[in-house]
C-alpha cells in the first residue's frame, strides 16, 4: 500500500508529498522531517514572505489607475469575478425555468429582496451619516484654510500689481539709447518675474494643503459605501432575476405570445374581405415564427472570466493539436532522412525565433480570407487564428526533439532491427518510435508551455474571447478594480500553466521506459 | 561436402580509411571454413579484429574484400539466418522479455499461427531458464537474465549460424558459468553452427570444437586453428580433470603470449607443427 502511494505520487510528479507519506508510515522520521522542511516548509515560508512584502509595498505606490492592489484586494477581485460568473449562470438558468421550479425560485428571490431592502436603507443612511461627518471635517479644516488662501492670493496680487505699475512708471523715465540704464532696468524686470514665479509656488503649496484635507481618507465612509454597493449590486441582480423569472421567462413569453396567436387566429377565421384575410394570415404566420424563435433562444450570457479560461484552454489545445500533428510526422522524417533534415533546417532556424505578435496579423488576414461569415463558420476566425499562431510558435520544440529522438536511436537497437530484417513500418513502430517517445514527450511538454504563453498574447491581439482578451479589456477599462483583476489573471495563468505542465510530466513518465528521472 | 564447408570465409579484408585517406587493413586475408553443426571459437587479444570478423559475418559491417558464403550463398547484409548475441543484451527496454523474443519469431515464421508462435517463443525462453519471468521488462531482470533473453531471441530464429560476440563478457564468473552450461545444452540439442568470440581460454576450450587463434592487428588473420577433442555432451568437472584440457589451454596461452611478444619485437610466433590448412594459407 505504502509503495503504491509512493509510486502514484512519483508518477504524478508530486515528489514533495513523498516524505509526508513516509513519515506517516514511520520511516526514518528525522530524515523525512528534514525533507519536509526542505520541500514544503521553506517554499511555504517564501510564499508567505513574498505576500507580506507585496502587501507592504503595494499601497506605497500610487498610479493613474489607483493604488497597486494588495493581496486582499486581489482576493476580493477574484471573488467578484467568481460571483459575476455564478450570477450570470443563475440568470441563464432562470430564463429556462418552468412551472413549479420557477415559482419556487421566484419566491426565494422575493424573500431575499424583502430581506435586503431594509438593509439597503440602513446602509444608505450610514453612508449619509459618514458623508455628513466628512462634510463637517472638511468645513472645520478646509474652510478656514480656503479663506486664508483667498486672502493670501489677494495680498500677493496687490503687491504684484503695485510693483508692476512702479516698473512701468520707471520705464517712462529711461532715456532713449541709454544702454546702461536699460540694462539695469532689464534686471529689475527679471527680478519681478522671479518674484511672480515664487508667489505662484507659494500659492500652489498652500493649495496642496487644502487638497490634502479634501483627500483625507474616511475609512468609515469607505466601509459604509462598500457595504451599500454590495447590497445594491445584489438587489439589482435579484431584480434582474425576478425579470427572468416573470416577464422575460421563456415559458411565460411563449405563453403570452400563444394567447396573442389565438387572438390573431380568431381574427383570421372571422375575416371577411380578401385583403383583411391576407393581412391576418401574414400576421399569424409572423407570430408563429417569433414563438419558434423564443422557444429555441437562450439567455445571452456574457463572457465571464471562468468561461474565458475554458475557451483559452480549448484554443491552446486546438493549437497544440495542430502543432503536434505537424511536428511529429515532420520530425520523424527529419530524423530518418538526412536529406529531409537538410531541406528543413533553414526553415526551422528561420521560423523558430519569430514572435507570435508577428504571426498573428498575417494569419488573421489569411484565415479571414477563408471565413467570409464568422457567424456560420464552425470556428470564430479570431479563435482559429489564435490557435494557429499557438501552433506555429509551439511546434518547434516538438519537431526538434522528435528529429533528435528518431535520429539518436541506440545503435544496438538498430542492429537488432537489421538482423531481424524488419520492414520500414515495423522498424518505425517497434524500434524507432518507442525509443524516441521520451524525447518526443519532452518536446511536447515544452511545446505546450510555449503555446500557453503565446496564447495569451495572441488572444490579446486578436480579441479572441479568452484570458488575453479579458486582460486587454481590463487594461482599457482602467478602473482600480480591473487593476486588481489583472493581478488575478497573473495567478490564473500561472496556475493553469503549472497544471498543464504537471499533466505533461505524468504522460512523459508513463511513456518513458527508463522512468524519465530528468523530468522535474 | 556441403556440410563440410557450411560456412566459408575466404580472404576476408576489412579496411578503414585513416585520417590521411589511406586504407588501413584491420583484418587482412582471413580464411576459415566451418562445418555444419560445429562450434568454433575465435580467440585473440582485444582489438585484433575478432568482433570485426563476426560483425562482417553477421552482415552488420561492410566487407572490404573477399567473401563469406553461408550454406552455399554469399551473404549480403544482415539477416535472421545469422542470429547475433551481442556483448550487451541489446533488448528493447519498452518490451517484455516475451515481446522481445516474439519480435523475431513473428518475422521468421510469417506463416505460423498465433498459437505456434507462442509455443516457439515460450519454448526458447524456457530453454534459457526464463519460464517464470518471461513477462518482465528488461529493467526488472538482472544482467545475466537479460543476456539469457538475448540468447533466447537468437535461438528462436532457428538460425543457420549463431554468432556469439563475447556473450559473457560483462557477467560475473558465476553467472558466466551458468550461461555457458545453458548455451552448451542448447547447442548439443539443436546442433546449431556457432561462431563464438571470446578472450577467455578456459571458456573457449570448454565450449568449442575448434578454436581459431587470431594474430594481433592490424592486418590480423588466422594464426592457427586448434581442434578440441572432447566428446559431447561435455561435463565441466570431467573435462577439468583431464590433462588434455590443460594442454589445450597451455597452447592457447602460449599463442596469445607470443602474439604480444611479437608486437613488442620479442620474437616470432611459434606455430604448432600439426596446424591445419588455414594456417598455411594464412602464412602465404
Image: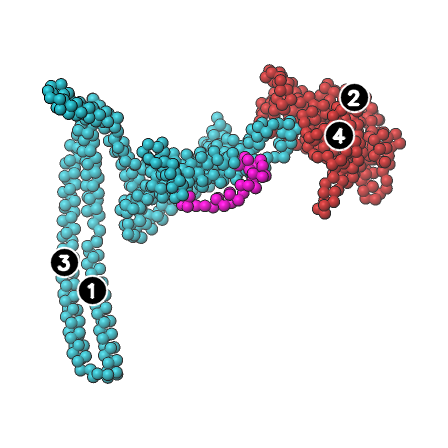
Closer mark to the observer between disc 4 and disc 1: 4
Q: Residues within 10 Å of mark 3 (few under 14, many from 20)?
A: some
Q: Nearest the camera: A413 or A461?
A: A461
Marks 2 and 4 sit apart, C-alpha to C-alpha, by 15 Å
Chain bearing mark 4: B
Residue at screen point 20% across, 44% down: A225
Q: Residues within 10 Å of mark 4 (few under 14, many from 20)?
A: many
Labelled disc at residue B68:
4
Which numbered disc flags the more N-terminal residue, 3 or 1? Answer: 3
Residue identifier under label 2: B3
Chain bearing mark 3: A
Query: Residue A361 at x, y = what percent?
Result: 39, 44
Q: Which tint was used for chain B?
A: red
Find numbered disc 1 in the image and state the secondary structure of the residue it sits on: helix
Query: Residue A517 at x, y = what percent?
Result: 53, 36
Query: Residue B197 at x, y = what percent?
Result: 74, 31
The stretch drawn in magenta includes residue A169: no
Amino acid at each position: 500500500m505504502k509503495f503504491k502511494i509512493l509510486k502514484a505520487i512519483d508518477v504524478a510528479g508530486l515528489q514533495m508529498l513523498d516524505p509526508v507519506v513516509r513519515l506517516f508510515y514511520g520511516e526514518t522520521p528525522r530524515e523525512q522531517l528534514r525533507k519536509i522542511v526542505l520541500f514544503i516548509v521553506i517554499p511555504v515560508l517564501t510564499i508567505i514572505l513574498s505576500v507580506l512584502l507585496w502587501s507592504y509595498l503595494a499601497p506605497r505606490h500610487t498610479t493613474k489607475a489607483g493604488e497597486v492592489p494588495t493581496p486582499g484586494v486581489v482576493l476580493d477581485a477574484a471573488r467578484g469575478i467568481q460571483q459575476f460568473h455564478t450570477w450570470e449562470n443563475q440568470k441563464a438558468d432562470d430564463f429556462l425555468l418552468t412551472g413549479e421550479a420557477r415559482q419556487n425560485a421566484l419566491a426565494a428571490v422575493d424573500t431575499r429582496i424583502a430581506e435586503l431592502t431594509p438593509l439597503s436603507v440602513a446602509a444608505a443612511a450610514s453612508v449619509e451619516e459618514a458623508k455628513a461627518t466628512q462634510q463637517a471635517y472638511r468645513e472645520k479644516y478646509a474652510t478656514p484654510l480656503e479663506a486664508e488662501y483667498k486672502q493670501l492670493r489677494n495680498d500677493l496680487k496687490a503687491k504684484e500689481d503695485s510693483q508692476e505699475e512702479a516698473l512701468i512708471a520707471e520705464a517712462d523715465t529711461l532715456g532713449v539709447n541709454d544702454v546702461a540704464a536699460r540694462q539695469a532696468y532689464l534686471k529689475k524686470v527679471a527680478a519681478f518675474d522671479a518674484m511672480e514665479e515664487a508667489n505662484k509656488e507659494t500659492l500652489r503649496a498652500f493649495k496642496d494643503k487644502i487638497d490634502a484635507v479634501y483627500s483625507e481618507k474616511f475609512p468609515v465612509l469607505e466601509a459604509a459605501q462598500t457595504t451599500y454597493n454590495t447590497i445594491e449590486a445584489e438587489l439589482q441582480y435579484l431584480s434582474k432575476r425576478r425579470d427572468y423569472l416573470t416577464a422575460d421567462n421563456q415559458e411565460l413569453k411563449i405563453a403570452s405570445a400563444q394567447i396573442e396567436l389565438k387572438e390573431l387566429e380568431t381574427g383570421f377565421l372571422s375575416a371577411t374581405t380578401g385583403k383583411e384575410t391576407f393581412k391576418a394570415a401574414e400576421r399569424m404566420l409572423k407570430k408563429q415564427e417569433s414563438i419558434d424563435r423564443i422557444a429555441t433562444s437562450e439567455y445571452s450570457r456574457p463572457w465571464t472570466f471562468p468561461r474565458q479560461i475554458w475557451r483559452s484552454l480549448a484554443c491552446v489545445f486546438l493549437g497544440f493539436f495542430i502543432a503536434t500533428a505537424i511536428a511529429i510526422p515532420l520530425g520523424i522524417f527529419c530524423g530518418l532522412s538526412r536529406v529531409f533534415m537538410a531541406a528543413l533546417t533553414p526553415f526551422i532556424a528561420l521560423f523558430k525565433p519569430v514572435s507570435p505578435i508577428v504571426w498573428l496579423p498575417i494569419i488573421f488576414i489569411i484565415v479571414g480570407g477563408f471565413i467570409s461569415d464568422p457567424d456560420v463558420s464552425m470556428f470564430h476566425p479570431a479563435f482559429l487564428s489564435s490557435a494557429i499562431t499557438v501552433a506555429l510558435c509551439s511546434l518547434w520544440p516538438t519537431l526538434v526533439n522528435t528529429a533528435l529522438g528518431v535520429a539518436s536511436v541506440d545503435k544496438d537497437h538498430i542492429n537488432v532491427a537489421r538482423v531481424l530484417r524488419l520492414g520500414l513500418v515495423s522498424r518505425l513502430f517497434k524500434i524507432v518510435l518507442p525509443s524516441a517517445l521520451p524525447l518526443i514527450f519532452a518536446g511536447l511538454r515544452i511545446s505546450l508551455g510555449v503555446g500557453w504563453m503565446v496564447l495569451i498574447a495572441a488572444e490579446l491581439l486578436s480579441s479572441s474571447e479568452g484570458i488575453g482578451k479579458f486582460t486587454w479589456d481590463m487594461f482599457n477599462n482602467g478602473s482600480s478594480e480591473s487593476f486588481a483583476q489583472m493581478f488575478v489573471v497573473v495567478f490564473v495563468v500561472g496556475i493553469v500553466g503549472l497544471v498543464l505542465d504537471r499533466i505533461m510530466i505524468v504522460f512523459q513518465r508513463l511513456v518513458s521506459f527508463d522512468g524519465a528521472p530528468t523530468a522535474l | 561436402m556441403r556440410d563440410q564447408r557450411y560456412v566459408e570465409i575466404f580472404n576476408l579484408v576489412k579496411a578503414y580509411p585513416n585520417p590521411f585517406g589511406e586504407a588501413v587493413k584491420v583484418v587482412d586475408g582471413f580464411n576459415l571454413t566451418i562445418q555444419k553443426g560445429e562450434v568454433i571459437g575465435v580467440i585473440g587479444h582485444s582489438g585484433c579484429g575478432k568482433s570485426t570478423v563476426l560483425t562482417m559475418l553477421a552482415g552488420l559491417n561492410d566487407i572490404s574484400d573477399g567473401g563469406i558464403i553461408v550454406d552455399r550463398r554469399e551473404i549480403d547484409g544482415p539477416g535472421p539466418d545469422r542470429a547475433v548475441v551481442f556483448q550487451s543484451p541489446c533488448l528493447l527496454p519498452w518490451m517484455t522479455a516475451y515481446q522481445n523474443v516474439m519480435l523475431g519469431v513473428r518475422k521468421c515464421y510469417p506463416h505460423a499461427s498465433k498459437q505456434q508462435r507462442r509455443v516457439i517463443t515460450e519454448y526458447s525462453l524456457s530453454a534459457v531458464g526464463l519460464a517464470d519471468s518471461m513477462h518482465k521488462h528488461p529493467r526488472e531482470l538482472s544482467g545475466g537474465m537479460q543476456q539469457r533473453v538475448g540468447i533466447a531471441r537468437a535461438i528462436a530464429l532457428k538460425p543457420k549460424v549463431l554468432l556469439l560476440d563475447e556473450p559473457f563478457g560483462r557477467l560475473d564468473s558465476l553467472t558466466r558459468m551458468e550461461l555457458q552450461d545453458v548455451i552448451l545444452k542448447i547447442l548439443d540439442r539443436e546442433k546449431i553452427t556457432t561462431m563464438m568470440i571470446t578472450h577467455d581460454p578456459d571458456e573457449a576450450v570448454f565450449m568449442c570444437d575448434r578454436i581459431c587463434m587470431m594474430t594481433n592487428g592490424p592486418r590480423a588473420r588466422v594464426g592457427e586453428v586448434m581442434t578440441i577433442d572432447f566428446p559431447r555432451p561435455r561435463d565441466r568437472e570431467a573435462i577439468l580433470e583431464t590433462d588434455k584440457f590443460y594442454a589445450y589451454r597451455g597452447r592457447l596461452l602460449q599463442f596469445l603470449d607470443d602474439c604480444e611478444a611479437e608486437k613488442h619485437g620479442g620474437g616470432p610466433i611459434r606455430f604448432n607443427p600439426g596446424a591445419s590448412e588455414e594456417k598455411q594459407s594464412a602464412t602465404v
